[in-house]
Image (cartoon, rainbow, N blue to C red):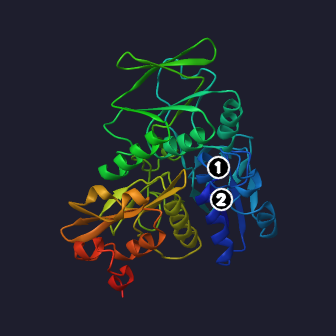
Amino acid sequence: MAIVIVGGGHAAGQAAATIRQEGFEGELVLIGAETHIPYQRPPLSKQYLAGEQPLDKLWLRPEKFYVDRTIDVRTGITVENIDRDGQFVACSDGSIVPYDRLLLATGSRPLRPNLPGIDLNGVHTLRTITDVDKIRTDMESATHLVIVGGGYIGLEVASVAVTANMQVTILEMEDRILQRVTHPFMSAFYHKLHSGKGVDIRTKTRASEFVGNGRVQTVLCGDGTTVDADLVIVGVGVVPNSEVASDAGLLCDDGIMVDERCVTSDPSIFAAGDCTNHPNALLDRRLRLESVPNAMEQSRIAASNLIGGDKQYASIPWFWSDQYDLKLQMVGFSSDGDESITRGEPESHEFAMFHFDRGKVVAAETVNSPREFMVAKQLIGRTIDPASLSNMDVDLKSLVE
């Protein structure tokens, strides 16, 4: 049996490793569009951007890992077509690669808004090593950075840039930063944090045009104001790379549709990671996630099932973000709650928020509180007295024993 994996990120790399770890000895090919072996993306907007992490420390596993396990890694190649009847993929280098089982781990790509000047030099999105290498080169001479979008990527980049003594402006079209992913209290906390470091955060402000003569010089906002900029990073969300699946007739809707076993509408084709729209029995709904933990766990399930397993994916999503010396860790979605409490003092930069829905813990957000986060993951779905969680005299471990 031949297995082909399409993708070069966390899901693809983990799936290849799991397939070999579970004893599959047949042909295993991994085809990645980038010129690098599978690597970690979270450090790109943090340690790698800051020059604190060398390139070879980004690899999920060293090249020798794939060689020793006879995993045929083909980089710098895109899959242009899936022939489901013939069970092969056609690649950009002209090669035809047959498969018995196919795993799509194609990930996602940054959304590039159709704005005037988006193609000027100095205007970037951030998703790949190549993206960050270009940004780092521009940062050597730039002094005014404008970040379009106040999500994780934007705030992480802001923390690196401010530390490098750049002037930073964030333009966020919504009412608050992190609006899509955190509770309003946490948004306000991080707004105050960044403002205190000198970041100019402008909410309810939309970028409408990038202006310059070959290179960006100014950002024009929807309200008519302008912001000086010799470097712009656009971080306004991502779109799933599902086109090759859709073109092959696979069912897609905001991602490649899979079931709880990571199987697509074709039983010989599986999908995992950011590109999927998948069911989550614990949340009782379908969703598409931009999450490294999801990509890793889902790819393990897919890999096992590719070689005959019968596992089902059902995990509560969790996320993290490093900004300055603070680690924000989240499990579940605060928007699912109807009541929230705080444990600890936000002023100390070590605290947690727990979110409830009809008495059950549905989500938690923690800042520099790894112990609270670990316990929070175990409390999801349990009915807990909110007063006991907010009381610092109560040992959290006692609530899960």
Check disc 2 and give the amino acid type: Val
User: Taking 110 as reference, is 61 left or right?
Assistant: right
Closer to the camera, 282 or 156?
156
Left of 379 or right of it: where is 62? right
Q: How far apart are marks 2 and 1 (CA)?
A: 9 Å
State the residue position of label 2: 4
Is residue 313 visible to the viewer in this orientation of the structure?
Answer: no
Q: Which of 331 and 249 is in front in this view?
A: 331
Tell me the amino acid under the disc marked 1: Val
Name the disc covering residue 89, or none: 1
The C terminus sits in image quarter: bottom left
Determine whether, in the image, residue 99 is placed left or right of residue 167: right
Q: Where is residue 50 in the image (x, y as percent from the top left)?
A: 66, 45
The residue lying at 66 percent from left, 65 percent from top is 16
Residue ranking furthest to the bottom: 401
Q: Where is residue 173 in the image (x, y as percent from the top left)?
A: 36, 32
Point 71% across, 33% down: residue: 137
